[in-house]
Amino acid sequence: MRRLIQHFRRRSEQRAVARRAIPDALWQLTLARYPFLGQLGAEDRAELRRLSSLFLDSKEFSGAHGLEVSDDMAVAIAAQACLPILRLGLAAYDGFVGIVVHPDEVQVRREFVDDDGVVHEYDDVLVGEAMEGGPVMLSWRDVSEAGETAAWGYNVVVHEFAHVLDMADGVADGIPPLPGSAERDQWHAVLMREYDAFCARVDDGLDTALDPYGAESPEEFFAVASEAFFVASHEMRNEHPDLYQLLATYYRQDTAPNEQ
Ligand SMILES: [Zn+2]
């Protein structure tokens, strides 16, 4: 029975990949625009392309403020979104369907209630946002600049999809679903130790390999660390070897292998 189910699943995946096949020229262009994708080994590139087709087939893109989401925009987003789940599989993203693409960053009005019950309003600028159950919001300008901004360990797509993975167990706490409580305890210990040290460095005004925004909270730290893990991995590994190892085990990828 299980073999039969696997057989049908494989057949339906093959049909989905065929339905949403990414043309060669567009795929090569995507790898060239985003060098952190182009540097993957041949097998990983082929798997990324297959996952990207499945992603395009199962997710719904929409443009905000009159933006038309073209094929090359959708492929750029799909390929970067599938990088973190290269070994985890697309099921890790089953919790949402919609992706809303804005032309540029988005101004939003926020409010919070302080300890005295007073409501404060303030403006916030978003380049992306992930909510439990979706949709994922992205600023196209920031997505499209990811090839250049990788040098600073910055990648909005990886950031938001790291939040999606984090929230897959129902809580945004910087801890994605893990096999058991021993793994959770270990994750919590390493994450918090690295987070506290990182916050101290940011407070001291020191340069960091990770976006200082990570000092906001443990869940932002996980998202920011994931960005650098995928697009500026050597810098990230040098500054945070323990955190690098934690993410390499979780993502099942060694993005900064030791040079031979
Ligand atoms: Zn975030």
Image (cartoon, grey):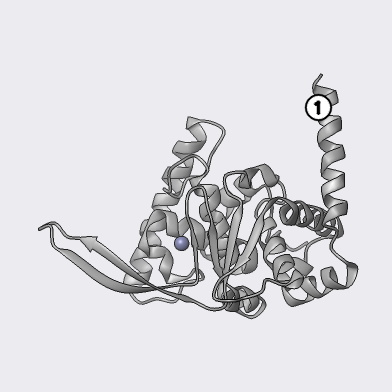
Q: Position of 228 compared to 2: left or right?
A: left
**Which residue occupies the foreground of this view, 44 or 92?**
92
Is residue 243 shown to the viewer in this render?
A: no
Q: Where does the image place residue 247, in percent across and percent down from the top left? A: 58, 51
Q: Which amino acid does label 1 sit on?
A: Ile
Q: Where does the image place residue 148, in percent across and percent down from the top left? A: 64, 80
**Which residue occupies the foreground of this view, 259 or 255?**
255
Q: Quadrant of the C terminus?
A: bottom right
The quarter holding residue 98 reads: bottom right
Residue name at image x 79 percent, y 56 percent = 53
Q: Quadrant of the N terminus?
A: top right
Element under label 1? helix
Q: Position of 113 compared to 205: left or right?
A: left
Q: Where does the image place residue 224, in percent across and percent down from the top left? A: 50, 63
221 lies above or below 208 = above
Q: Where does the image place residue 97, in percent across and percent down from the top left? A: 61, 51
Residue found at the very far top of the displayed protein:
1
The quarter holding residue 116 reads: bottom left
Residue name at image x 64 percent, y 67 percent = 231
- The reply to whether the residue tagged 1 has its Cβ within 8 angstroms of ligand 1 is no
The quarter holding residue 2 reads: top right
43 lies above or below 156 = above
Q: What residue is shown with label 1?
A: 5
Is residue 173 shown to the viewer in this render?
A: yes
Q: Position of 249 compared to 10: left or right?
A: left
Residue found at the very far left of the displayed protein:
116
**Which residue occupies the foreground of this view, 101 or 127?**
101
Within 10 Å of the Cα at label 1, are there few (<14), some (14-19), or many (20+) other Cα atoms? Answer: few
